[in-house]
Amino acid sequence: MGTIRHVFCDMDGTLLNSAGVVSATNAAMIKHSGVPLTLVSARAPMEMAAAIHMLNLHAPQIGFNGGLIYQPGAHGWNVISQRTIEFLAATTLLRAVATDFPNVSLSFYDLNRWYADRVTPGLRYEAKLTGQTPTLADWRTVLTSPTEPVFKVMMITFDRDEMARLQQFVRSLQLPHVAIAQSGTAYLEVTHIEAQKSRGINYIMTREHLQPADTAAFGDGHNDLPMLKMVGTPVVMANALPEIKAVGQVITKSNDEDGVGYGLQQLL
């Protein structure tokens, strides 16, 4: 194994423990490794901020599943590259789901805010998970004269039958240039069609003149597979499913045992 010059890392189930945070031990081991680290997440920058701060990261980061490549700056986020949902597609989607699925938690993100028009059980669940508070506003008002583009529309339902119907319904809208992806059992997320983790990684590898052999990645889920296949050293968490572990060159400890920090210490 050659020298690893850059590491890509998933957040939920990988870097973050079951409590949704980076443990102090994990942070210390990661910082001690000294390798530039890029977080690769479906999360918004505000939901990545605590981990970025704790790890003292300055390298480019990847949010919204690759819809946003940005660098932490002294005053907020410096956008390097973005792929956002067309406003007409966003408003069509929000209007249709609000009408046909009144029980689904509906919210959306721009660069700095998470918008919802009411607090629902799904929204409370997400807020607890990420430590964020949604900005309560009617999306019709927000998107009438939008100043910030929409990166992600998020729908949450804990009813599996409703999720199946919702997914079919959203696909039937045939919105242009969007990707529709289920995340876990309760989340359905809509982003730009080019919002792929692989796009973000490609961009950074080109920018930093990195070969696959120079890179490693840590992941635990199906949406990490493209990332794990792009790097020279794919590292999979002990808490991952067997089919994800099959892709790993290295299996590290679980996310509750500081697996990323441990893996970096073993790798280097």
Image (spheres, rainbow, N blue to C red):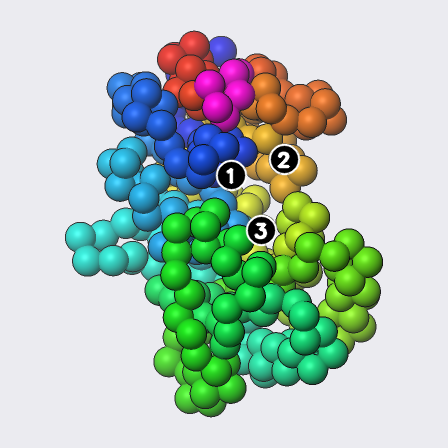
Q: Is mark 2 on a helix, strand or loop?
A: loop
User: Tag on residue 12?
Assistant: 1
Q: Taking 114 as reference, is 29 above or below it?
A: above
Q: In which quarter of the image is residue 92?
A: bottom right
The residue to which callout 2 is attached is 221
Q: Is residue 253 magenta?
A: yes
In whole angstroms, how far apart are the C-alphas of marks 3 and 2?
14 Å
Residue at the image position 56 percent from the left and 44 percent from the top: 198
- Residue type at mark 3? Gln
- Residue type at mark 2? Gly
Q: What element carries label 1?
A: helix
Tell us which disc is closer to us: 3 or 2: 2
Q: Is mark 3 on a helix, strand or loop?
A: loop
Q: Taking 138 as reference, is 152 above or below it?
A: above
From which residue to which does the magenta span run?
A: 252-257
User: Tag on residue 196?
Assistant: 3
The image quadrant where one finds the C terminus is top left
Q: Is residue 171 magenta?
A: no
Of residue 205 and residue 31, the one placed in the foreground of this image is: 31
